[in-house]
Image (spheres, rainbow, N blue to C red):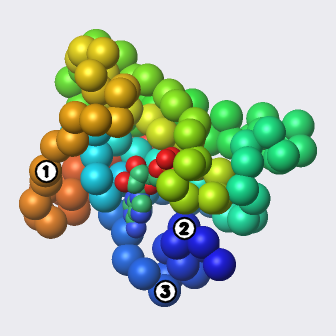
Amino acid sequence: MSIFTKIITGEIPSYKVAEDDNFIAFLDINPNAKGHTLVVPKKEEDKIFDLSKEEYKNLMDFSFRIAKAIEKTVPCKRVGMSVIGLEVPHVHVHLIPLNEMADIQFTKKVKLTNDEFVSLAKSISNNFI
Ligand code: AMP
């Protein structure tokens, strides 16, 4: 069982932004930039291109809506998107507020307090439609 499935089942906590029957979005615990969010299908699949076309399209739809909410919440030049999965073998889309190239390079990290994570997740969630 992946660490993200444990988040989905509630076995371990997360800073949840939104969820529906098929997807969940929560803040990345080791963010590249403030507002870095992961969008995860509830069905545990390792690689994104092993999803069915329909699952893939639905994941992109959900990610689109989350990206809009991030854009409304976090000042940035744009929201970037990346799919890696070399660390956690459960499909996830990284949505990252970008101000400079380093924000998408997974080397620069920012530290947030628990309170900052909580209020950020709530603010993005409030802007999710
Ligand atoms: P990758 O599999 O290379 O796309 O990276 C996995 C991402 O998941 C990293 O950015 C981690 O910081 C993030 N991550 C790992 N565990 C957790 C967790 N429990 N809650 C939130 N994010 C996590």
The three-letter code of the residue at mark 3 reads: Glu
Residue 10: x and y in percent read 49, 82
Left or right for 61, reference 103: right
Residue 4, disc:
2
Residue 84: x and y in percent read 56, 40
Left or right for 8, reference 102: right
Disc 2: residue Cβ within 8 A of ligand 1's nearest atom: yes
Q: Residue at x 34, y 41 (%)?
A: 36
Disc 1 marks which residue? 111
Q: Residue at x 73, y 43 (%)?
A: 48
Left or right for 98, reference 85: left
Secondary structure category for the residue under label 1 = loop
Q: Which image quadrant for residue 75? A: top left
Q: Residue at x 30, y 15 (%)?
A: 101
Secondary structure category for the residue under label 3 = loop
Foreground residue, 92 or 115? Answer: 92
Q: Compared with residue 26, is residue 3 higher up or lower down, i.e. above or below?
A: below
Residue 16: x and y in percent read 40, 62
Foreground residue, 119 or 113? Answer: 113
Foreground residue, 43 or 48? Answer: 48
Is residue 22 at all visible to an observer of this figure? no
Task: Tell me which image quadrant ligand 1 sits in.
Answer: bottom left
| Tags 3 and 2 touching, CB below 8 Å | no
Disc 3 marks which residue? 11
Foreground residue, 19 or 13? Answer: 13
